[in-house]
Amino acid sequence: MAEFVGRPFFSCRNCRNPVALADDILSRKFRVKSGPAYMFTNATNVVIARAQDRELLTGAFSVADIYCSNCHEGMGWKYVRAYDPKQKYKEGRFIIDLSKILKEY
C-alpha cells in the first residue's frame, strides 16, 4: 500500500482494493467488450489466471485473465505472448476495463 500513498491510482470499483498506479498507464486507447480500457505496465493486488490462446481485434495472443485479489471481480487480462512480431510490445502488459476501476488520489 505504501507505493500508492500520495500518488494517483486506480482501485477496484467493487471493493476499493488498489490495483494500478496512474503513472503506469501506457495507453488509453484500448477496448474490451464492455467499452474503454487502459493498458498498464504493471498491476498489483490481482490474481492472474492460467493463460489461454485468444483471437483479439489485433491478432492472436496468449492472455491470462486478471481478477481483484480481494473480491475476485474480473478486471481484464495480461498479455502473456503475442504471436505477431508487431504486437510483441504488449507482452507482460495489463489491460484493465475502465468500468471495473475508480481513480483515487
Image (cartoon, rainbow, N blue to C red):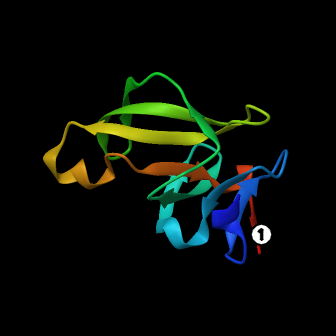
Is any part of residue 27 visible from this angle? no
Residue 26 placed where, x, y %? 43, 67
- Dividing the picture into quadrants, the one containing residue 72 is top right
Residue 45 x, y percent position in the rendering: 65, 44
Helix, strand or loop at mark 1: strand
Q: Residue at x 50, y 67 (%)?
A: 25
Of 14 and 17, the residue lying toward us: 17
Q: Residue at x 54, y 73 (%)?
A: 23
Q: Is residue 44 visible?
A: yes
Q: Residue at x 82, y 52 (%)?
A: 16
Q: Which residue is mark 1?
A: 104
Q: Residues within 10 Å of mark 1 (few under 14, many from 20)?
A: some
Can you say whether 103 is above or below 18 in the image? below
Q: What residue sits 46% from the left and 31% below the top? A: 64
- Is residue 26 shown left or right of residue 4? left
Report the front residue among 35 and 84.
Answer: 84
